[in-house]
């Protein structure tokens, strides 16, 4: 028995690298145990405190990870399946901050909707652990693992609101299409394994760099399926059809949570797979991404024009943003990677804060999401209205907000490698999208509807909105530190 | 070289003013007072800079007050300001516009936010004019849309939302071409030098590029600036927007922001892509001439005074474009002068239209008649502004139009000839409008309108003084503009004619 055990050599584990995942999963388990052991239902306050503490702890850990990187450089661990590099550290911190913000929003929502128990926080922590795992994955299997942990948590979270049938409907739709996408992804991973003999991203890259495939059909098919799988997750056109319905149906704080961490996790893994592993094949996947970028940016913006539901508008807006982020990946250069990172880390807080406001306006039962509900909001509550205006302008890409520099950095990356026509298409799509952002922000300042009841702003949600707006403006006026951070993070990117 | 703090002050004073105005919102009228004070300080700064400006700083071409600080190296973003004879007058115009717009276009609905937006707009416009870095210019240029948008939607007429959206989308889409062009140029330069990414104007001007690249980039820049100016056929947003904007907004848009277009065209499109100019010049000259004629025709058919000024501005912007792309030094000096003069004249027009609207509740031409008798002062000032606009010798418009036409005629005679008919057309539409509004018999409400109050007269005085002074004695202005234009034309000259 002992002989059998000793014949399995455990790979060495660098615990600092996996500490964020352990903290998030640990907090999730802790909440489960508390629920099981305590006689009464756990109060929202306790659940929220534990979740917030866990996400803050992750932020602290990323700081030490960053210092560790500075001294000893990027490394891989657990048989090269997990990577600790600048890119993963910054993305992990972003996931943690998004989780923190989304949790605070969900707390007030749960109190308002009289949700009992800690299930929401348990699932959110687990999903975040999946997202973090995706940012650190250096193996297709680990990417898949992260993807599934992230998705399984979200399927349940989307269905969380039992009072509205749309919530269940959205969850079913998300589950079916998401499951389908996961299957496609794992099939793609299998084909890539067949073609290259490994699922490890570094090994794949090394193999493709040192061998010429005489029959690359298997690899191409595998790579294409991986892109389709990611396309589903990031809601790139034509794989976006689930996203508006799910965004609309899910409880609003879940939508905000989903919009931020799924983007971070999925795009981080996307970058790793296509640029680290399949970097040598960029001649084949770049034309595909070219089409995806153009379709995603233009269709997201154009279909968004006819929407009258705030959540659907934000869904199409996020599709348009996905087009821009893909543009950074399309560039495929160092600048492209750092711009993708810059985009997701600035977009995440903006979108969480936007959905925080939508949650508040949604009111009891989370039903009031018509764009008309926002008429005159800024007249009744100037601060709330101004905050939403700033967040919308940031998503529009107005200068002095992070949204401008996010767009600017991906456009710069694309133009650097000769993507001028594609950049122009993307930027013109932003001009189309500007219509619905502006219509929305104009209606905030409408003179009529001044007698509608005020929107209650609980303290935690107010804090999140304030923080989101502050980040948007601060790094919009002074993007230097964040840009430098992303540049450093990418220089420490393990290929 | 003078300290760049003067230029920073130009940016900061209105911003502080807008914060002050918002802080003072509780007491009625106090925020207006704060705004007027900060606009006056801005004007005083403008005057000081006018006299300080030195066009012979060693090694800085004709730029003065220059400084450069890199803000975000990975993005190539920098705070880089400098002032030359061309931007000097745009800065002066900005200071004049905001002060007169505040004094003459007071809007008491939600006054604190109104004046705050106006002051923010002023700061951003100043930023665009003193920016010496393409990316920085773009940031300011693009940002001016936001205050404009909110001024039009918040204080405009019935169709203000539609107008503002149209304005925003037109300009935003067009500036996409500008941003892509700027990035392309920046990376082209970086790839050539293998240095760090920079968008500094002086550095990028030396980028080597192929002929076709230059033409593409020029076209992209020209689209962005052509919408803003507006240049025919990109002008279709302007009549609705000018008409729906509040008086102060119309003044800002047509007197000032339009100049961002023509200034950008001169400084960035012509200044950076001289290679392209030789090829696109016939096209640009033709568009300019069409703009002059088309604007004149439309101005005759306009049914209300704001649209009337919008169309006449199209014609005037045609003259400016003619001078800017002509490649002739004389015509370019004239164009810069006309940018300033047209700004002042437009302030005059919109102020009077605003005063009439306040009295009659309408600016439709059919509603107004025979105002000469009840309001002789308004009619008189309108006459002076109108004659200045027609180009009567002795008034400001004459000097600039004369320089443009004579310069253009020397190098591109036929366009000069056709353009000159625009002067005639201007006389037709302006005099006809005057006849319809101010002459004839005043009946009903028109017969009893009060003449300009002492305050309104006070606001109109600077306009009249500038129109007359620049017509009689343009020397102080010309001597400041000429060296910078000389510099620019010499840079452009190898590719074009030089007279």
Image: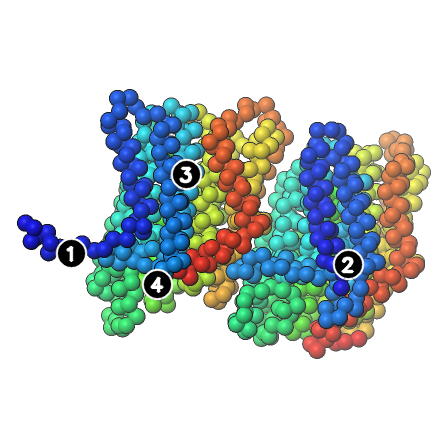
Q: Quadrant of the N terminus of chain B?
A: bottom right
Q: Which mark is residue A495?
A: 4
Q: Is residue B281 left or right of residue B428?
A: left
Earlier-in-chain disc, 1 versus 4: 1
Residue A214's label in the rendered image is: none
Report the residue that reaches farthest toward the front: A71
Q: Secondary structure at mark 2?
A: helix
Instruction: Report the side of A156 relative to B233 (left or right).
Output: left
Residue B491 shows in the view: yes
**Residue placed at 70% from the left, 50% from the top?**
B11
Give the CA distance from mark 1 to mark 4.
26 Å
Callout 2 crowding tier (Cα within 10 Å): few <14, some 14–19, many ≥20: many
Q: Which residue is mark 1?
A: A9
**Mark closer to the observer (2, 1):** 1
Q: Chain of mark 1?
A: A
Is residue A177 visible in the rendered image? The answer is no
Estimate the spatial distance between the alpha carbons at disc 4 and disc 2, rounded to whole Å: 52 Å
Q: Which residue is mark 3?
A: A100
Splitting the image into 4 quarters, where does residue B179 fall?
Answer: bottom right
Frontmost residue, B155 versus B239: B155
On the same chain, marks 3 and 2? The answer is no
Give me the residue at 89% from left, 45% from top: B461
Residue A251, position as x, y percentages in the image: 39, 33
Chain letter for mark 4 = A
Q: Which mark is residue B88?
A: 2
Of tags 1 and 4, the one toward the viewer is: 1
């Amino acid at each position: 028995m002992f002989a059998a055990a000793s014949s399995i050599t455990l790979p060495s584990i660098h615990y600092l690298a996996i500490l964020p995942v352990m903290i998030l999963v640990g907090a999730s388990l802790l909440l489960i145990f508390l629920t099981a052991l305590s006689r009464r239902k756990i109060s929202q306050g306790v659940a929220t405190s534990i979740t917030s503490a866990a996400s803050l702890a992750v932020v602290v850990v990323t700081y030490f990870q960053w210092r560790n990187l500075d001294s000893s450089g990027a490394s891989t661990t657990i048989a090269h399946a997990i990577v600790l590099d600048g890119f993963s550290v910054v993305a992990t911190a972003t996931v943690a901050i998004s989780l923190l913000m989304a949790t605070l929003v969900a707390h007030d929502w749960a109190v308002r909707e009289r949700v009992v128990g800690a299930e929401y926080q348990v699932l959110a922590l687990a999903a975040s652990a999946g997202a973090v795992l995706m940012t650190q994955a250096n193996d297709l299997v680990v990417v898949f693992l992260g993807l599934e942990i992230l998705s399984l948590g979200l399927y349940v979270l989307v269905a969380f609101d039992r009072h509205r049938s749309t919530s269940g409907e959205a969850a079913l739709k998300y589950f079916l299409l998401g499951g389908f996408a996961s299957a496609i992804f794992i099939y793609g991973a299998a084909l890539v394994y067949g073609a290259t003999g490994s699922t490890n991203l570094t090994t794949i890259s090394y193999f493709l760099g040192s061998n010429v495939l005489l029959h690359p059909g298997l690899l191409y098919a595998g790579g294409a399926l991986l892109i389709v799988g990611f396309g589903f997750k990031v809601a790139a056109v034509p794989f976006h059809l689930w996203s508006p319905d799910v965004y609309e149906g899910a409880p609003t704080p879940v939508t905000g949570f989903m919009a931020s961490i799924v983007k971070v996790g999925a795009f981080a893994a996307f970058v790793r797979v296509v640029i680290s592993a399949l970097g040598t094949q960029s001649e084949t996947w770049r034309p595909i991404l070219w089409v995806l970028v153009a379709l995603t940016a233009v269709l997201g913006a154009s279909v968004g024009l006819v929407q009258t539901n705030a959540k659907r508008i934000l869904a199409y807006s996020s599709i348009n943003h996905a087009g821009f982020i893909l543009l950074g990946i399309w560039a495929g250069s160092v600048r492209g990677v750092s711009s993708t990172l810059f985009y997701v880390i600035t977009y995440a807080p903006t979108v969480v804060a936007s959905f925080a406001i939508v949650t508040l306006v949604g009111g009891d039962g989370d039903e009031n999401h018509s764009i008309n509900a926002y008429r005159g909001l800024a007249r009744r509550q100037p601060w709330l209205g101004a905050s939403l205006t700033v967040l919308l302008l940031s998503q529009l890409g107005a200068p002095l907000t992070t949204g401008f520099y996010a767009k600017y950095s991906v456009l710069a990356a694309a133009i650097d490698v000769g993507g001028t026509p594609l950049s122009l298409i993307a930027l013109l799509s932003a001009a189309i999208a500007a219509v619905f952002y502006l219509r929305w922000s104009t209606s905030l300042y409408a003179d009529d509807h001044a007698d509608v009841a005020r929107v209650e702003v609980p303290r935690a949600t107010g804090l999140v909105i304030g923080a989101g707006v502050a980040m948007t403006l601060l790094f919009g006026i002074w993007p230097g530190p964040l840009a430098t951070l992303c540049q450093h993070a990418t220089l420490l990117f393990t290929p | 070289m003078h300290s760049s703090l003067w230029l920073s002050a130009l940016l900061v004073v209105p911003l502080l003013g807008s914060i002050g105005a918002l802080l003072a919102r509780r007491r009625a009228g106090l925020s207006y007072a704060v705004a007027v004070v900060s606009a006056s300080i801005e004007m005083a700064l403008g005057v000081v800079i006018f006299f300080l400006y030195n066009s012979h700083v060693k090694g800085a071409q004709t730029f003065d007050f220059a400084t450069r600080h890199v803000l975000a190296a990975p993005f190539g973003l920098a705070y880089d300001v400098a002032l030359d004879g061309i931007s000097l007058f745009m800065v002066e115009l900005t200071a004049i516009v905001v002060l007169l717009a505040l004094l003459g276009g007071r809007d008491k609905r939600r006054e604190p936010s109104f004046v705050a937006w106006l002051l923010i707009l002023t700061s951003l416009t100043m930023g665009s004019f003193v920016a010496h870095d393409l990316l920085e210019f773009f940031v300011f240029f693009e940002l001016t849309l936001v205050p404009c948008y909110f001024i039009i939607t918040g204080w405009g007429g019935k169709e203000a939302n539609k107008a503002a959206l149209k304005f925003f989308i037109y300009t935003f889409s067009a500036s996409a071409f500008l941003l892509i062009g700027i990035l392309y140029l920046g990376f082209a330069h970086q790839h050539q030098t293998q240095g760090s990414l920079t968008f500094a104007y002086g550095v990028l001007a030396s980028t080597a590029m192929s002929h076709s690249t230059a033409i593409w980039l020029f076209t992209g820049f020209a689209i962005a600036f052509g919408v803003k100016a507006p240049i025919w056929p990109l002008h279709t947003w302007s009549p609705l927007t000018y008409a729906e904007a509040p008086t102060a907004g119309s003044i800002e848009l047509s007197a000032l922001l339009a100049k961002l277009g023509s200034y950008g065209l001169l400084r960035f499109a012509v200044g950076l892509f001289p290679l392209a100019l030789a090829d696109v010049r016939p096209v640009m000259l033709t568009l300019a001439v069409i703009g002059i004629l088309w604007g004149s025709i439309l101005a005759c058919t306009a049914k209300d005074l704001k649209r009337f000024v919008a169309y006449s501005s199209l014609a005037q912007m045609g003259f400016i474009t003619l001078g800017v792309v002509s490649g002739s030094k004389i015509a370019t000096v004239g164009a810069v002068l006309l940018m300033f003069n047209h700004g002042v004249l437009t302030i005059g027009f919109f102020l009077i239209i605003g005063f009439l609207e306040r009295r009659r509740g309408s600016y439709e031409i059919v509603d107004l008649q025979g105002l000469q008798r009840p309001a002789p002062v308004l009619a008189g000032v309108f006459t002076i502004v109108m004659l200045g606009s027609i180009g009567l010798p002795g008034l400001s418009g004459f000097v600039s139009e004369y320089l443009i036409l004579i310069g253009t005629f020397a190098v591109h005679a036929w366009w000069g000839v056709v353009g000159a008919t625009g002067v005639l057309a201007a006389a037709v539409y302006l005099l006809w409008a005057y006849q319809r509004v101010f002459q004839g018999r005043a009946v009903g409400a028109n017969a009893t309108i009060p003449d300009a109050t002492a305050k309104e007269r006070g606001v109109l005085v600077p306009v009249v003084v500038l129109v007359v002074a620049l017509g009689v004695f343009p020397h102080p202005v010309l001597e400041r503009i000429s060296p910078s234009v000389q510099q620019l034309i010499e840079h452009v000259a190898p590719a074009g004619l030089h007279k």
